[in-house]
Amino acid sequence: MNSGDTTSPAERLRLIQEHFLAPGATGPRAERVARTTEPAAAMRIDVYDHMRNAVTETVALAKELCDEHEPYEPRPAKLEHLYEWLVAETPHLDEERRQARDAVIYRQGLEHAILIGEADIIRRHPCPSCVTWGLVWDRHTKSVVCWNRHCADDDGQATRWTLAQLAEDHIARKNRRAARAT
Ligand SMILES: [Zn+2]
Protein backbone atom coordinates (compact mmCIF):
# COMPACT_ATOMS: atom_id res chain seq x y z
CA MET A 1 0.00 0.00 0.00
CA ASN A 2 1.22 3.48 -0.82
CA SER A 3 2.07 5.39 2.31
CA GLY A 4 0.74 8.59 0.76
CA ASP A 5 3.45 10.84 2.13
CA THR A 6 6.49 10.78 -0.11
CA THR A 7 7.04 14.48 0.63
CA SER A 8 7.08 15.25 4.32
CA PRO A 9 4.97 18.08 5.81
CA ALA A 10 8.22 19.85 6.72
CA GLU A 11 9.54 19.65 3.16
CA ARG A 12 6.30 21.14 1.92
CA LEU A 13 6.67 24.06 4.30
CA ARG A 14 10.07 24.69 2.74
CA LEU A 15 8.61 24.40 -0.78
CA ILE A 16 5.95 26.97 0.03
CA GLN A 17 8.59 29.37 1.27
CA GLU A 18 10.74 28.85 -1.81
CA HIS A 19 8.01 29.04 -4.40
CA PHE A 20 5.61 31.57 -2.98
CA LEU A 21 7.45 33.62 -0.42
CA ALA A 22 10.92 34.07 -1.87
CA PRO A 23 12.60 37.34 -0.80
CA GLY A 24 12.94 40.33 -3.10
CA ALA A 25 10.14 41.96 -5.04
CA THR A 26 7.68 39.48 -3.61
CA GLY A 27 8.44 40.32 0.02
CA PRO A 28 5.57 40.74 2.47
CA ARG A 29 5.48 44.53 2.48
CA ALA A 30 5.35 44.76 -1.32
CA GLU A 31 2.57 42.22 -1.32
CA ARG A 32 0.44 44.06 1.13
CA VAL A 33 0.74 47.29 -0.85
CA ALA A 34 -0.13 45.54 -4.10
CA ARG A 35 -2.90 43.49 -2.57
CA THR A 36 -5.90 45.29 -4.02
CA THR A 37 -4.69 45.36 -7.62
CA GLU A 38 -2.72 42.16 -8.05
CA PRO A 39 -4.47 38.80 -7.88
CA ALA A 40 -1.11 37.05 -7.61
CA ALA A 41 -0.23 39.25 -4.66
CA ALA A 42 -3.58 38.54 -3.04
CA MET A 43 -2.83 34.88 -3.48
CA ARG A 44 0.45 35.31 -1.67
CA ILE A 45 -1.36 37.03 1.17
CA ASP A 46 -3.39 33.85 1.45
CA VAL A 47 -0.14 31.92 1.60
CA TYR A 48 1.07 34.11 4.46
CA ASP A 49 -2.19 33.52 6.29
CA HIS A 50 -1.86 29.81 5.67
CA MET A 51 1.69 29.76 7.05
CA ARG A 52 0.78 31.86 10.05
CA ASN A 53 -2.15 29.60 10.88
CA ALA A 54 0.04 26.51 10.58
CA VAL A 55 2.66 27.98 12.94
CA THR A 56 0.08 29.25 15.43
CA GLU A 57 -1.64 25.88 15.61
CA THR A 58 1.64 23.99 15.97
CA VAL A 59 2.94 26.27 18.74
CA ALA A 60 -0.39 26.06 20.59
CA LEU A 61 -0.32 22.27 20.32
CA ALA A 62 3.25 22.14 21.66
CA LYS A 63 2.22 24.22 24.68
CA GLU A 64 -0.84 22.09 25.26
CA LEU A 65 1.10 18.83 25.06
CA CYS A 66 3.86 20.12 27.33
CA ASP A 67 1.20 20.34 30.07
CA GLU A 68 2.90 21.87 33.06
CA HIS A 69 5.73 23.74 31.43
CA GLU A 70 6.61 25.90 28.45
CA PRO A 71 8.40 24.22 25.53
CA TYR A 72 12.11 23.94 26.37
CA GLU A 73 13.27 25.43 23.10
CA PRO A 74 11.60 28.38 21.40
CA ARG A 75 9.88 27.70 18.12
CA PRO A 76 12.58 27.39 15.42
CA ALA A 77 13.16 30.35 13.12
CA LYS A 78 13.37 28.05 10.13
CA LEU A 79 9.85 26.83 9.53
CA GLU A 80 10.99 23.56 7.96
CA HIS A 81 12.10 22.55 11.47
CA LEU A 82 8.70 23.31 12.99
CA TYR A 83 7.41 19.73 13.17
CA GLU A 84 10.76 18.34 14.26
CA TRP A 85 10.60 20.82 17.13
CA LEU A 86 7.05 19.82 18.07
CA VAL A 87 8.02 16.14 18.17
CA ALA A 88 11.22 16.83 20.14
CA GLU A 89 9.28 18.89 22.71
CA THR A 90 6.68 16.17 23.26
CA PRO A 91 8.57 12.89 23.71
CA HIS A 92 6.57 11.29 26.52
CA LEU A 93 3.06 11.24 25.18
CA ASP A 94 0.81 8.26 25.58
CA GLU A 95 -0.14 6.43 22.40
CA GLU A 96 -3.41 8.29 21.94
CA ARG A 97 -1.94 11.76 22.27
CA ARG A 98 1.04 10.86 20.10
CA GLN A 99 -1.30 9.73 17.34
CA ALA A 100 -3.33 12.92 17.69
CA ARG A 101 -0.14 15.01 17.43
CA ASP A 102 1.08 13.09 14.38
CA ALA A 103 -2.32 13.46 12.74
CA VAL A 104 -2.16 17.25 13.14
CA ILE A 105 1.27 17.29 11.49
CA TYR A 106 0.05 15.05 8.70
CA ARG A 107 -3.11 17.10 8.18
CA GLN A 108 -1.04 20.27 7.93
CA GLY A 109 1.07 18.48 5.32
CA LEU A 110 -2.07 17.76 3.29
CA GLU A 111 -3.09 21.40 3.59
CA HIS A 112 0.35 22.51 2.38
CA ALA A 113 0.12 20.11 -0.59
CA ILE A 114 -3.29 21.43 -1.60
CA LEU A 115 -2.07 25.01 -1.28
CA ILE A 116 0.78 24.36 -3.72
CA GLY A 117 -1.47 22.67 -6.26
CA GLU A 118 -0.78 19.06 -5.32
CA ALA A 119 -4.29 18.06 -4.32
CA ASP A 120 -3.74 14.77 -6.14
CA ILE A 121 -2.10 13.57 -2.95
CA ILE A 122 -5.63 12.91 -1.69
CA ARG A 123 -5.98 10.10 -4.25
CA ARG A 124 -3.14 8.21 -2.63
CA HIS A 125 -5.25 7.54 0.47
CA PRO A 126 -7.88 4.83 0.77
CA CYS A 127 -11.35 5.92 1.87
CA PRO A 128 -11.52 5.59 5.69
CA SER A 129 -14.90 3.90 5.37
CA CYS A 130 -14.95 1.64 2.28
CA VAL A 131 -11.13 1.41 1.97
CA THR A 132 -11.24 1.76 -1.82
CA TRP A 133 -9.13 4.17 -3.87
CA GLY A 134 -10.77 7.06 -5.60
CA LEU A 135 -10.97 9.87 -3.08
CA VAL A 136 -10.90 13.33 -4.61
CA TRP A 137 -10.45 16.79 -3.18
CA ASP A 138 -13.45 19.06 -3.71
CA ARG A 139 -12.03 22.57 -3.57
CA HIS A 140 -15.48 24.17 -3.47
CA THR A 141 -16.56 22.51 -0.26
CA LYS A 142 -12.98 22.01 0.96
CA SER A 143 -13.70 18.38 1.69
CA VAL A 144 -12.62 14.97 0.49
CA VAL A 145 -15.21 13.01 -1.50
CA CYS A 146 -15.44 9.25 -1.98
CA TRP A 147 -17.10 8.52 -5.32
CA ASN A 148 -17.58 4.81 -4.65
CA ARG A 149 -21.36 4.51 -4.95
CA HIS A 150 -21.37 1.62 -2.49
CA CYS A 151 -19.93 4.04 0.05
CA ALA A 152 -22.71 6.61 -0.43
CA ASP A 153 -25.46 6.94 2.15
CA ASP A 154 -29.03 5.69 1.62
CA ASP A 155 -29.95 8.88 -0.22
CA GLY A 156 -27.07 8.43 -2.65
CA GLN A 157 -25.03 11.25 -1.12
CA ALA A 158 -21.31 10.64 -1.57
CA THR A 159 -19.32 10.16 1.61
CA ARG A 160 -17.28 13.22 2.59
CA TRP A 161 -14.30 13.57 4.88
CA THR A 162 -12.43 16.44 6.39
CA LEU A 163 -8.66 16.57 5.99
CA ALA A 164 -8.43 16.00 9.75
CA GLN A 165 -10.42 12.76 9.45
CA LEU A 166 -8.29 11.60 6.54
CA ALA A 167 -5.10 12.39 8.47
CA GLU A 168 -6.31 10.56 11.59
CA ASP A 169 -7.16 7.53 9.50
CA HIS A 170 -3.80 7.64 7.75
CA ILE A 171 -1.84 7.82 11.02
CA ALA A 172 -3.92 5.06 12.59
CA ARG A 173 -3.31 2.78 9.59
CA LYS A 174 0.39 3.57 9.61
CA ASN A 175 0.64 2.71 13.31
CA ARG A 176 -1.27 -0.55 12.84
CA ARG A 177 1.13 -1.50 10.03
CA ALA A 178 4.10 -0.64 12.26
CA ALA A 179 2.64 -2.69 15.13
CA ARG A 180 2.20 -5.70 12.84
CA ALA A 181 5.76 -5.37 11.55
CA THR A 182 7.34 -5.63 15.03
ZN1 LIG B 1 -15.65 5.30 0.56
Image (cartoon, rainbow, N blue to C red):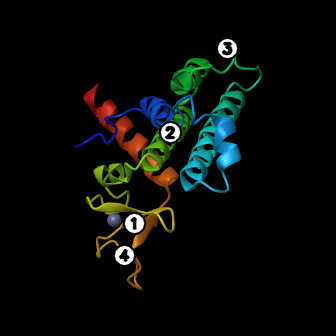
Q: Quadrant of residue 153?
A: bottom left
The residue to which callout 1 is attached is 145
* Relative to 139, 29 lies left or right: right
Q: Disc 1 residue type?
A: Val
The residue to which callout 4 is attached is 152
What residue lies at 27% left-to-right and 62% top-to-bottom? 134
Q: Earlier in the sequence, mark 3 or mark 4?
A: 3
**In this orientation, which residue lies closer to the viewer: 82 or 77?**
77
Q: Which mark is residue 73?
A: 3
Q: Quadrant of residue 89?
A: top right
**In this orientation, which residue lies closer to the viewer: 45 or 107?**
45
* Relative to 132, 81 lies left or right: right
Q: Earlier in the sequence, mark 3 or mark 1?
A: 3
CA–CA distance in space, label 3 to label 2: 28 Å
Q: Earlier in the sequence, mark 3 or mark 2?
A: 2
CA–CA distance in space, label 3 to label 4: 47 Å
The residue to which callout 2 is attached is 20
CA–CA distance in space, label 2 to label 4: 38 Å
Q: Disc 2 residue type?
A: Phe
List x then y, in percent, for residue 11.
42, 29
Q: Earlier in the sequence, mark 2 or mark 4?
A: 2
List x then y, in percent, for residue 18.
47, 31
Is residue 87 visible from the viewing direction of this image? no
CA–CA distance in space, label 2 to label 1: 28 Å
Q: Could you say whether the residue bearing mark 2 is in a helix, strand or loop?
A: helix
> On the rendered image, what quadrant is the C terminus found in?
top left
